[in-house]
């Protein structure tokens, strides 16, 4: 995986945001077929955790997940399917970093993302969306944490691959 130059990142974002509903649904469906454990985690488990606190933020997180999935697939192709054991190992590694970050907000998680510019764009999107309604503001941190975890998982998925499926 390489760092996406700004032009490539924005082209991938525009691709994601301009998909019609049929093409978007096909991308999500294929992801569920190729990566069932990961899809369940980022599209069901993570938003359920956020929804326990605030449904609006959970819905927005889902939009960001879709954008991220499209960006990574557009830029890097579909990754080789991974096992549930792979996902468990990734989640164990992430949980240590996220717990440390929650204890000390000044210490960035050691598992930072390669696509830092994309991460910043998503973080700012969360801030902007939450600022539109004061009931969302207390849930910025959890949404950003789940988004960082999701990005780490997508990056780990693409780092591990040796060849692309499509």
Image: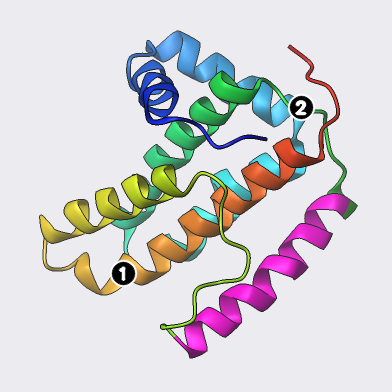
Using the image, tell me which numbered label, if any, was put on residue 34: 2
Picture colour scheme: rainbow
> What residue is rendered at 66% in x and 20% in y?
77
In the image, 32: left or right of 46? right
Mark 2 Cα shell of 10 Å, populated few (<14), some (14-19), many (≥20): some
Rendered position, 39 above or below 91: above
Say above or below: 43 vs 1.
below
Instruction: Give the overall secondary structure of the magenta segment.
Output: helix
Secondary element under disc 1, as helix, strand or loop, is helix
Q: CA distance from mark 1 to mark 2?
A: 31 Å
Residue at figure coordinates x 89%, y 54% from the top left: 85
The structure residue drawn at horizontal position 65% and vertical position 44%, both measured from the top left corner, is: 155
Q: Which residue is mark 1?
A: 139
Residue 125, disc: none
Indicate the quadrant where residue 35 lies: top right
Q: How many marks?
A: 2
Q: State the extent of the magenta-drawn residues as a range.
A: 86-104
Q: Nearer the viewer, residue 104 or 135?
A: 104
| Residue placed furthest toward the bottom | 103
Closer to us: 139 or 110: 110
Q: From the image, which quarter does the N terminus lie in?
A: top right
Dot 1, how many residues are within 10 Å of its Cα: few (below 14), some (14-19), or many (20+)?
many
Query: Helix, strand or loop at disc 2?
Result: helix
Residue 89: in magenta span: yes
Image point 33% across, 22% down: which residue? 17
């Amino acid at each position: 995986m390489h760092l996406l130059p700004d032009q490539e990142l924005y082209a991938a974002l525009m691709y994601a945001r301009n998909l019609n509903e049929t093409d978007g649904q096909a991308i999500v469906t294929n992801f569920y077929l190729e990566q069932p454990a990961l899809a369940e985690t980022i599209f069901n488990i993570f938003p359920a955790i956020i929804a326990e606190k605030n449904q609006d933020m959970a819905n927005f997180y889902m939009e960001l997940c879709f954008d991220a999935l499209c960006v990574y697939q557009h830029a890097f192709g579909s990754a080789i399917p991974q096992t549930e054991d792979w996902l468990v190992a990734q989640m164990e590694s992430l949980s240590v970093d996220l717990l440390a970050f929650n204890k000390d907000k000044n210490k960035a998680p050691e598992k930072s993302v390669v696509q830092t510019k994309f991460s910043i764009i998503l973080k700012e999107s969360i801030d902007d969306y939450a600022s539109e309604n004061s009931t969302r503001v207390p849930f910025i941190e959890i949404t950003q944490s789940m988004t960082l975890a999701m990005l780490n998982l997508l990056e780990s998925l693409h780092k591990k691959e040796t060849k692309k499926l499509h």
